[in-house]
Amino acid sequence: MSAVSGFDPVRLEILNTEVAAAAEEMALTLRRTARSLYVKEAVDFGVGLVTPQGRFFGNPRNFGSALLDYDISPTLEALGETLEDGDVLFTNHPYETAGLVSHTPDLTVIRAYYVDGRIAAYGYCFVHSTDVGGKVPSSVSPTNTELFQEGLLIPPVKLLRAGVWNKDILRLYKANVRTPELNGHDLTAMLAALETGAARVAAMAGRDGIDAFLAGQRALMDYAADKARAVLRRIPDGTYDFWDYLDDDAITPVPMRFAVAMTARDGAIELDFTATDPQVISAYNVPTLGRRHAWLTVRILHFVTTHDPTVPMNGGIFRDVTVKLRQGTILDPVFPAPTGVRAASAYRLNDAVTGAFAKAVPQDVPAPSGGAMVPVVLAEFDRRTGARNVLVLNSIIVGSGARFGSDGYDGIDGSLSTIRNTPAEKSELEAGVDILEYGLNPDSAGAGEWRGGLGLKFTFRVTQAGSAVLGRGLERFYFRPWGMAGGLPGANMRVVLNIGTAREAELGKIDMVPLDEGDTVTFLTPGGGGYGDPFRRDPAAVLDDVQSGFVSEAAARRDYGVALTGGAVDAAETERLRGARAPLTAAFTFGPERDAWDAVFTPERMAALNARFMGLVPAARHGARQAFFREVVPALFDPAARAARNVVTDRRALGEAIDRWIAEG
């Protein structure tokens, strides 16, 4: 390390390692002492050390969520009083925390670490709780229409004062959740993690003095900022726009558009999301209160740390990143808009930012992943006690996108989520299910010179009546994960009841589905987009994919132009197939569904439409938007047309209808 802010470079390197190790130890304490599968197996939690100004300077390198661009200062302000020594703040309110809590299951605690009577740092911890009450078991439903349906709302309050529990708050909390004992154990584990952080901060600040420790925090942030800007200068100056879609809002079939304009100037980056669609009545809104937010800037983090893995993992990375938002849109909703499935929106806006990067530096970023993360939740009744049992059977992810020079990763996606899978034996031990299959989903990846990563196939059977399955974050049923540089899109998402039987049924995007004893449910997730013309892929690599069960012989012939005979490549037929079409060179390959939609819903038309909708009060926007699409695109509301992914037929007539509607005002 070079010297930063006059700080000794050797000491700075030591401090960087120390704060990361302290945060790592906090994470290990939490994971080892918690009870829920969300924490112990899925690792759906976060911990960190925070400066007195509210920014993260110490983060674990191997556990939990990357929270580097969060700010705890609005949460402290909302508390309305100082955190004294031994106090612990407790909250799960998305709006009162300015998005530090992004949906109600994310229970959050904060503690001030005092050294010599001064705040040396804050300790932070959140866990995704199994249940916080609300309309459905696990609290998160895509069809929730207001925040109050998403569970008990806890504004920033003091759970502990001077180390003493506020038992009234604890009783109130436990009385409003379906799994009070489980949640209580996780809450205690969070406090243990904060205690670990307190000990480590006391050791670091006590050794060199609090002033030196605070100076070290600033130096670490400055150093990360300088190194991040050096990486971001790889992006040529200019403005790069892109957009992507969620299939629908789960209440209506109307797609949701996420648009970004990324402007680069000498390593300073502005992300302008103001052209994104208005907030929706369902749970896909992302609470930011108009601030820069970790969900919006995660692609910046990936880009910086990929090109320079030595960058300290702290909030300084984003010093030269600004964000523009428009209040009342999906990315800056107005209370009490629900936010429970905000991760689905985060995936798609992340894909939009990926597209902007791809326009600027096409060989520096991968094609998008399958674009979803699906916690599969089982709700059942305990046979002994009759109590409701709620748990995550598994967090099903997708395949990652291919990139220049490399295939995507099969069944792995680090584009947004750091969630881990749950061992089948653990799920079967704690729930009335048999896990029948958990593996890769053949033919799900986008074909390319470099193939996208395969998605997953997960099938389970319920063993008792009265159960129900919930799945949130389900996406890409209609719009596919797109390919780059001639690569093809990945497959669509599927959810199937009783697959392979006479009672097989496509479930589509589910909310809460009741199940009979013996029913099976299968989740088939998309793979990532391909990169490069698939006809340029080495036929031997295609043969290996077929023999491995990743690609079918039919797909090898159709998508890769590789003919197989007797378990070997038919060189002559392959040459004929590959010579029968022109090379694929398009920067992006979206698939016919999006091509048709984009042809009529151009950026100019969307800007005019959204201007109309945003001119209404938030409560009226949903109805007006639905009425417009029902009038102008009636096929969108036809289940058969949607199942065939063919809601746009006569592009010219539809475009004219949209223009008339806009002109009539």
Image (cartoon, rainbow, N blue to C red):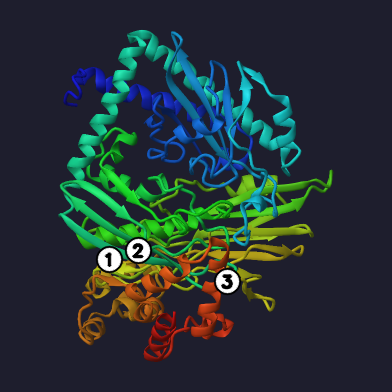
- Residue 232 is situated, as x and y percent measured from the top left of the image, at 21, 46
Question: Which quarter shows the N terminus?
Answer: top left
Helix, strand or loop for disc 1 = loop
Task: Please state if 286 lies on the left or on the right of 651 as rendered.
Answer: right
> How far separated are the C-alphas under marks 3 and 1?
40 Å
**Pointer 1 residue:** 531
Badge 3 amino acid: Gly
Q: Nearer the viewer, residue 420 or 236?
A: 236
Q: Nearer the viewer, residue 400 or 152?
A: 152
Badge 2 amino acid: Gly
- Residue 51 is situated, as x and y percent measured from the top left of the image, at 39, 26
**Pointer 2 residue:** 452
Residue occupying the point 65% across, 70% down: 497
Task: Please state if 293 lies on the left or on the right of 540 as rendered.
Answer: right
**Going from the N terminus, do you reach mark 3 or mark 2 first?**
2
Q: Nearer the viewer, residue 398 or 170?
A: 170
**Going from the N terminus, do you reach mark 1 or mark 2 first?**
2
**Pointer 3 residue:** 623
Task: Please state if 284 lies on the left or on the right of 575 as rendered.
Answer: right
Q: Nearer the viewer, mark 3 or mark 1?
A: 3
Helix, strand or loop for disc 3 = helix
Residue occupying the point 42% across, 23% down: 22
Helix, strand or loop for disc 2 = loop
**Number of other residues with Cα within 10 Å of mark 3, as a class: few under 14, some 14 to 19, many 20 or more:** few
Residue 182: quarter of image: top right
**Number of other residues with Cα within 10 Å of mark 1, as a class: few under 14, some 14 to 19, many 20 or more:** many
